[in-house]
Image: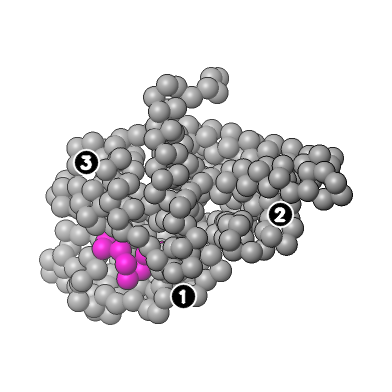
Amino acid sequence: MDFQLTEEQTLIQDMARQFSDNELAPHAEKWDHEKFLDRTVFEKAAELGFMGIYQQEEHGGTALSRLDSALVFEQLARGDISHTAMITIHNMATWMIDRFGSDELRARYVPKLCSAEYIASYCLTEPGAGSDAASLTTKAVRDGDDYVLNGTKTFISGASWSDIYVVMARTSDDGARGISTFVIEKDTPGLSFGAIEKKMGWNAQPTAQVIMEDCRIPAANRVGAEGDGFKFAMAGLDGGRINIGCCSLGGAQASLDMALSYTKERKQFGKEISAFQNTQFKLADMATELEASRMMIYRAANMLDNKLPNAGAACAMAKRFATDMGSKIANDALQLHGGYGYLSEYGIERIVRDMRVHQILEGTNEIMRVIISRSMLRQ
């Protein structure tokens, strides 16, 4: 096992870090305050290949490995978690089209998605179907050369802002095997959006319901075969769990960097607070927890790349651990700042708020434990 990055991976990592430092970090506080998702950031990210990062080259993708992509997303999240998370969601939805769609569907959408002319959202969760995603009730009924969709998706990142919606809908009553995947464009008649939710974090990106009322789309907009949609959605989420874990890595690293800097400058009782053993032990624990999280995320990404049979469980383990530890590290960094950590100008409280949802989305960490234990008991 070689734990050293290759020269190419180091260059990719450095490029992402520079983009994060120049294009994300200086604006993160403003975006959070103004609740603004900056489309120009996505266009600039596309110029570096970050908007089709693990898509095939045929239609403009960068074709990086999942491990290479993890290196990029981690660095981007150091600058701003909210924008980075939307980039990862876009990549997950785009990958589903590129991996499972027909040649015609791929040619129609993937080039525009990789160039950021279109931004994509992923639509699985419903008001009555969260962790029990297979119980979704949104229906897609075949009508000649079309499908007519009716139903509501909730907690959709980018709702009303994105151009493309990758929607999981029921085409039969056969449980998980009755779910199919569809691509819906924003201006399609019958597609509308709920009010923008008021959230604890991820304030830069809009979150709302996606509502379909007799929403008619061409049958050619179905991704893959009828009944395969749930498998596609779960395959997307394996990578999505790595991606959101990377967002936690980046946020945790930014928090640790801030804590190191602050504790070396802040003086109490006549000396820097970094000189106190209590502070030193806290910093040591934070660094250890971050490094363990990073190794788990990188390993799971590598297992996905190599299509190992237990990759799904590894992704669940890595997501559960990295998002739990990431939130803990950010909260510890806030504590080391004392009262100043509670002020928005120091940036720590925004990271704490942004990272809290990582333990919920892409499958709650309780569901991650279900996936892990089932994998263990099957062996």
56 left or right of 28 in image: left
Residue 217 is situated, as x and y percent measured from the top left of the image, at 19, 68
Q: Is residue 99 magenta?
A: no
Give how far across and how far down residue 188 sits, in percent: 20, 72
Which stretch appears magenta? 156-165
Query: Which residue is denoted by mark 3 in the rendering?
Result: 60
- Which residue does the numbered mark 1 point to in the structure image? 197
Q: Where, quadrant-wise, is the N terminus in this rendering?
A: top right
Q: Which mark is residue 110?
A: none
Residue type highlighted by circle 1: Glu
Q: As rendered, which of 81 and 317 lies closer to the eye?
A: 81
Residue flagged by tag 3: what amino acid is it? Gly
Q: Residue at x 64, y 36 (%)?
A: 292
Q: Main secondary structure of the magenta part?
A: loop
Q: Nearer the viewer, mark 3 or mark 2?
A: 2
On the picture, is 333 further left or further right than 146? right
Looking at the picture, does residue 266 appear above or below residue 341? above
In front of the other: 159 or 117: 117
Query: CB atoms at circles 3 and 2 under 8 Å apart?
Result: no
**Residue bearing the label numbered 2:** 337
State whether residue 55 appears in this view: no
Query: What secondary structure is marked by label 1?
Result: loop
Which residue is rendered at x = 39% and y = 49% of the image? 23
Disc 2 to disc 1: CB gap under 8 Å: no
Q: Residues within 10 Å of mark 3 (few under 14, many from 20)?
A: many
N-terminal of the two: label 3 or label 1?
3
Q: CA distance from mark 2 to mark 1?
A: 30 Å
